[in-house]
Amino acid sequence: MMGRLESAQERFFYDFRLDDIVPPDHLVRKIDAVLDLSWLHGELAPYYSHTGRPSIDPELMMRMLIIGYVFAVRAERQLCSEVQVNLAYRWFCRLGVEDAIPDHSVFSRARHERFCESEAFRLVFETVVGACLKEGLVGGESFSVDASLIKADVNPVKRVPGDAPIDWPEPEQATRAVTEYLSALDQDCPEDRPEDRPEDRPEDRPEDRPEDRKSGKRKTPPKAVSLTDPQAAWVAKRKVRPIFAYDANYLIDNKLGVIVDAEGTCANRVEENRVCVSMVERVMTRFDLKPKRLAADTAYGSSDTLKALMDRGIEPHIPVWDKSKRTDGTFSRADFSYDAERDVYTCPGGNILKTTGNAHSDNTLRYRASTRDCGPCPLKDRCCPNTPQRKIPRDINESVRDRVRALAGTPAFKRSRDERKKVEMAFAHMKRIFKLDRLRLRGLSGARDEVLLTATAQNLRKLARYVCRPPPTLKTA
Ligand code: SF4
């Protein structure tokens, strides 16, 4: 007999426990079983006043944000609506069926104020990494690092040339992103001006500029500045429409692809290299992890980064960034042999090139041949046809670069190259499953928060998949 649903929506009173409604194998149960946020109140207490009306419970806010990032509901208004109607989300947030949901505007303000000031997102991220370590998901022997562009939440049409004067609004009328940008300019911090992503514009790489190599900071203005989010970098790729973007930087453990550190930064190579070393250092300090190998692509092959890793006892499995190869038919640097003992180069004509030992502003020594040797040399047309003598630049850390070059081709290097795909997979998941292909928050602080929360969500899902068993539910009679 065909059944017919008897509508029961007119009832005023229901007799059920929320705990019975949430299925035992639901993802929220698995995540709840591994996530301990009991420390959060104590950590955030100094950021709250002792008087006035009670604020939203910070643990409730954090649980709602975790729901938002794990289930890719990042819009605050939509997140509040989802928690309102979804019983599993309510259960995870420790809310009863009749409890009120925070207003989205209050939620948003509290998130940008106290949570940003207190580094709460980083603490939660590190708590989850700590849980992964405890469960044995982190090998700690071999890491990979990479960066991926994320579109900024701006209209690219609203931009001005970087060298044009900009009439910024008064501080009381400026948006949070503009205020953050202007205060960064005032403090003269490295994030003060957005920059083009260098690998897309090889002729314009910051590392090519001696003054930038020295200071780690670009002096020339960017091509374009967004009026909505001035800290976003204008990225001009070949054959692709330019965008304003930030970088998501991930440091992953190669055993199971757990993200051991993450940071959102301005999109440029100098920042990527800086944050690579700072992430490695932070992981070593916070978790006492010291990897033997670090795999990365050529963008991380600058001598400063390689030296920083070697100094910390980490083998950089990174292709060395080398621009010494010539394609015009004249001799490249590789055609000259270096004698480390005498600190001289010998040219193909058998003559010696010497250096004064004074480093130039781009951190290189210049080895020069004698004009008396080069002038009558029969190889001059293939060596230095347009100059009276041949000069060979050598990085002051070239010995480090040579040691890293020697690692290329070893079985461990090849294994690292294969394992590096895991970090690319993490970025693919970040964009496809967690929908972080475009930021919702503006400003560098917004990019940092969103990258950290997404990395936390990715680790939580991994942790739940590998180790979690649903806790037994209480059966009511
Ligand atoms: S041109 Fe000068 S540096 Fe080049 S091979 Fe001849 S002597 Fe050597």
Image (cartoon, rainbow, N blue to C red):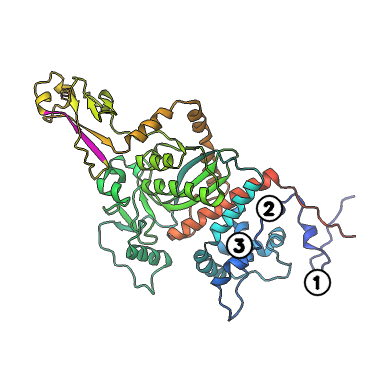
Rendered image: mark on residue 62: 3
- The image's mark for residue 34 is 2
Question: Does dot 2 land on a helix, a strand or a loop?
Answer: helix
Give the label, 3 or 2, closer to the camera. Answer: 2
Question: In the current view of this chain or complex, which residue is farthest to the top?
Answer: 378
Horizontal and vertical percent for residue 99?
70, 70
Residue 12 got which mark?
Answer: 1
* Left or right of residue 115, residue 37 in this image: right
Horizontally, residue 265 falls left or right of residue 141, namely left
- Residue closer to the observer: 226 or 28: 28
Query: In the rendered structure, which segment of residues is drawn in magenta?
Result: 364-370
Q: Amino acid at mark 3?
A: Met
Quick one: label 1, few (<14), some, or many (20+) residues within 10 Å?
Answer: few
* For residue 240, above or below residue 171: above
* Nearest to the observer: residue 44 or residue 161: 44
Q: Quadrant of ligand 1?
A: top left
Image coordinates of residue 107 in percent, x first then y, are 57, 68
The answer to the question of whether label 1 and label 2 lie on touching residues, with beta carbons closer than 8 A, is no
Q: Residue at x 31, y 44 (%)?
A: 207
Give the mark toward the camera: 1 or 2: 2
Please tell me which residue is depicted at 52% across the width and 65% down the height of the picture. Answer: 118
Q: Earlier in the sequence, mark 3 or mark 2?
A: 2
Nearer to the camera, 311 or 40 = 311
